[in-house]
Image (cartoon, rainbow, N blue to C red):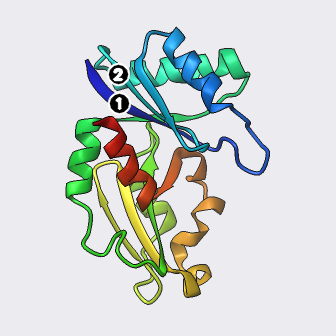
Amino acid sequence: MEKYIALLRGINIGGRNKISMPLLKVAFEEIGFLEVVTYINSGNIIFSSAIKDKNELIQKCESIILDKFMLNIPVTIISEEELSDTLKHTPIWWGIDKESINYAIFVIPPLSTEEVLAEVGEANPEYEKVSHYGDVIFWSAPLKTFSKARWSKIASSSVNKNVTIRNANTVKKLLLLTR
């Protein structure tokens, strides 16, 4: 049995794609996942499964969301081990400055990290910092100059539907909840 985190993209934002977390928890349990826990309302589900194939896990998650909630929601999966390793490789500047926005951008397959980096472009070092490890891109930008950062425009880029974004506190909490 391995612990995983399913990250759903674009739910419960501005009244769109509404999914009840208690009902989502029950749906995940109905398809055989164990130790299911949801965290906040933005689509973070921790669970255990004997299935090792992440593509199979993604397919099961997306199918149950479509079946139960009639929503076609992209999902990415990261194991507890992968998230722990990723957080050991965060840049020293990520998640430190309380006056900055600190995001982890999770790339949803089949898109690659390299494709996202190429599409959004080079960070503007005057206004932001960007680094990556595996399928996660780390980004920080001061709140006062956030709108000047190139990566603040990721929501309007062509790769937006293939990423899901969490803040540093959420990512760190998700790892704690897997333990």
Which disc, if any, is residue 48? 2
**What kind of element bears circle 2?**
strand
Q: 50 or 148: nearer the eye? A: 50
Q: 172 or 162: nearer the eye? A: 172
CA separation, marks 2 and 1?
Answer: 6 Å
117 displayed left or right of 31: left
What residue do we see at 60% from left, 69% from top? 153
Q: Position of residue 71 (x, y in %)?
A: 70, 27
The residue type indicated by label 2 comes to Ser
Q: Which residue lies furthest to the right in this view?
A: 15
Label 2, residues with CA under 10 Å away: few <14, some 14-19, many ≥20: many
Q: Could you tell me how many numbered marks the image carries?
A: 2
Which disc, if any, is residue 4? 1
Quadrant of residue 24 within the rendered picture:
top right
What residue do we see at 31% from left, 28% from top? 3
**Of callouts 2 and 1, which one flags the residue occurring earlier in the amino acid sequence?**
1
Label 1, residues with CA under 10 Å away: few <14, some 14-19, many ≥20: many
Q: Where is residue 119 in the image (x, y as percent from the top left)?
A: 50, 61
Quadrant of residue 62 within the rendered picture:
top right
Q: Are dots 2 and 1 in contact, CB under 8 Å?
A: yes
Question: Please, is residue 19 above or below residue 152 in the view?
Answer: above
Quarter occupied by the N terminus: top left
Which disc, if any, is residue 133? none
Q: Where is residue 82 in the image (x, y as percent from the top left)?
A: 25, 41
The residue type indicated by label 1 comes to Tyr
What residue do we see at 46% from left, 25% from top? 58
Question: Please, is residue 2 above or below residue 40 in the view?
Answer: above
